[in-house]
Image: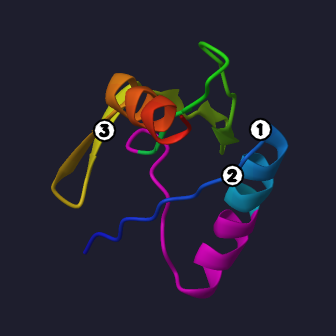
Amino acid sequence: MTDDTTLLASTQERIRKFFEDLVQERACYNMYINAQKSKIMVVSRHGNISVQVDHEGESLEQVQDFKFLGSLFQLYCLKFKLATISR
């Protein structure tokens, strides 16, 4: 069985807090978080930003694109759409 979850936050501190909350809650449902399959993607107007989130001693990989529920999200396309919407 697999379950997909997406966490959204406006700061690195908040994403860490949300992830910590997720780690605590998963124990209630006897779920396992696989750090090797978990990814981080940052969308920012301020250029490349590196985010460090760890789980059980492993750093989560930061990616520029990922597939979620059959849809491909790409950092370049998301930045372009954000810039277009803000005009």
Horizontal side of residue 28 vs 4, given as left or right: right
What is the secondary structure assignment of the residue under circle 3?
Answer: strand
Residue 24, above or below 82: below
Measured as percent of width and height from the top left, residue 28 is found at: 63, 86
Horizontal side of residue 86 vs 25, given as left or right: left
Question: What residue is at 67 percent from the left and 27 percent from the top?
Answer: 51
Q: Looking at this view, name the residue that lies furthest to the left.
A: 70
Which amino acid lies under the numbered mark 2 shown in the image of this protein?
Ala
Residue 43, above or below 72: above
Q: For mark 1, what is the residue?
A: 12
Foreground of the two, 18 or 33:
18
Foreground of the two, 37 or 72:
72
Question: What residue is at 66 percent from the left and 64 percent from the top?
Answer: 23
- Mark 1 and mark 3 lie on one chain; the one further toward the N terminus is 1
Mark 2 in CB contact with mark 1 (< 8 angstroms): yes
- Mark 2 and mark 3 lie on one chain; the one further toward the N terminus is 2
Q: For mark 3, what is the residue?
A: 66
The numbered disc on residue 9 is 2
Measured as percent of width and height from the top left, residue 3 is found at: 35, 71
The numbered disc on residue 47 is none
Mark 1 and mark 3: Cα distance apart in space: 19 Å
What is the secondary structure assignment of the residue under circle 1?
Answer: helix
Horizontal side of residue 70 vs 51, given as left or right: left
Q: Looking at this view, name the residue that lies furthest to the top.
A: 47
Q: In this picture, which residue range is highlighted in magenta?
A: 21-37
Measured as percent of width and height from the top left, residue 72 is found at: 22, 42
Q: Looking at this view, name the residue that lies furthest to the bottom.
A: 28
Residue 75 is inside the magenta segment: no
